[in-house]
Amino acid sequence: MRVFFNAIIVQIFLNAYIYWFGWQGLPCKKYLKILYASVYIAELIIYFTGFFTSKYLSFDALHDLAWVGTTWMLFTIYMTGILLIYDLVKYLNRKKKLFQGPDLKAKKTRLAYFLLSLVLVCSAMAYGNYRFWNPVVTEMNISVDKESPVKSLRVVMVADIHAGYLIDKDIISMYIDKIMAQKPDLILLVGDIVDYDVKSLYEQRMETEFLRLKAPYGVYASTGNHEYIELGEAKDEKILWLSEKAGLTVLRDTTVLVANSFYIVGREDDMCGTRKNLPEIMQGVNKDLPVIVMNHEPHRLQEEVDAGADIALYGHTHNGQFFPNNVIMKLSSMLYNTGIIPEKNKLGFMYELPYGYKEKGNTHIYVSSGLGLAGPQFRIGTISEIVVLNITFN
């Protein structure tokens, strides 16, 4: 129902506004108006074909339709925002006479602004798509003040891969290549490994890529909210695919002692109805040894600090994914950190740390911007990220 609502709002109302804005600026030439109208008609046909017939289409068709639909949706949002500025200025100038300049009602002025907006949005999206296809490797050195038989550890951590129809097997192959190129001692996948449904994974035999993940101390995963989205699947089918097909060790409110040297704790996502609290999960943990906690959603960082985690790793936020969400998220974080808003009353996009590193108490915290994406394949103002932690134990 929510998807249908978004389709109605974005694909009809916003598109109608953009269409009308451009139409008013077009020269009175029939072939130009036919060409212009054809673009919008074709896009709507493509979008609603994918929306209403998705269960009957092949993987390749769904992939292409999803890419076109999500790309056009982002384009529509950006174009609407920029064009509204023009109409707002025109309205205010008519009421208040703010400036003497070009006639904002004139066709030529309107067309020039429309074309300039088109170039600006397309340029931003081209850059954003480049950022998506070229993940950044963020490397950090961390010192943990604990003894361990393992004196140093090179950990590769990624979150929010979102494997599925849009993040397809070719993209996953690129991700695996880049992860393995870091020569990790340990690989940690912190939730939202799967996008929406498990069908796309079976259709592509996606497990053949995940099985290439190898590290001396293992490959571990925790669940994210997308692992709990059920689209006509059996309960926990995505999670079972990760463990049984993809060969990952999925830690579900579980603690594991690795090589008698350090602990890894994997927490269930907040969407799990049987999620345990962290002290309960960590019963029996020898805190003289280093403890690394994976927890997909960074809502309550103090829980990991109070439980004695040395390193706490999160994802989920995508750092807003694209502008202006990243700015909104940063500003909401600043507001939240003032303490004015109690934890129980905060909005879902408010985080103490929406992205990056922070040392809180004796805990090293990192919230990843995510490697893959949910929806449009664009990173505008954010990065696709592989995190490499060079950890030393003293």
Image (spheres, helix red, strand yellow):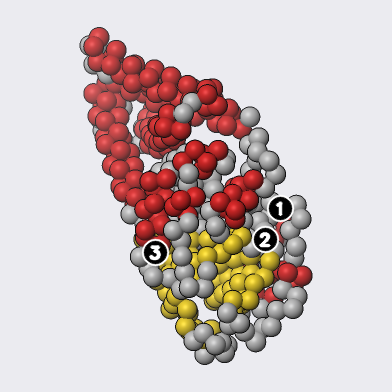
Residue sitting at x 40%, y 62%: 179
User: Residue 192 appears at what percent x and percent y?
Assistant: 56, 52
Q: Nearer the viewer, mark 1 or mark 3?
A: 3
Tag 3's secondary structure? helix
Task: Establish if 129 lies above or below 143.
Answer: above
User: Residue 107 appears at what percent x and percent y?
Assistant: 27, 21
User: Residue 286 appears at what percent x and percent y?
Assistant: 69, 83
For residue 125, say whether it is visible: yes
Q: CA distance from mark 1 to mark 2?
A: 10 Å
Task: Establish if 91 lies above or below 33.
Answer: below
Disc on res. 20: none
User: Mark 1 and 3 residues: CB-CB less than 8 Å, in contact?
Assistant: no
Q: Which residue is mark 1?
A: 272
Q: Amino acid at mark 2?
A: Arg
* Mark nearer the N terminus (3 vs 2): 3
Disc on res. 180: 3
User: Mark 1 and 2 residues: CB-CB less than 8 Å, in contact?
Assistant: yes
Q: Amino acid at mark 1?
A: Cys
User: Residue 372 appears at what percent x and percent y?
Assistant: 45, 51
Q: CA distance from mark 3 to mark 2?
A: 25 Å
Task: Establish if 335 lies above or below 3.
Answer: below
Q: Which residue is mark 2?
A: 252
Asked which quadrant contains residue 73, the reply is: top left
Residue sitting at x 43%, y 34%: 63
Q: Amino acid at mark 3?
A: Met
The quadrant of the rendering that contains the N terminus is top right
Tag 2's secondary structure? loop
Asked which quadrant contains residue 4, the reply is: top right
**Residue that lies at the very extreme toward the top in this rendered image:** 30
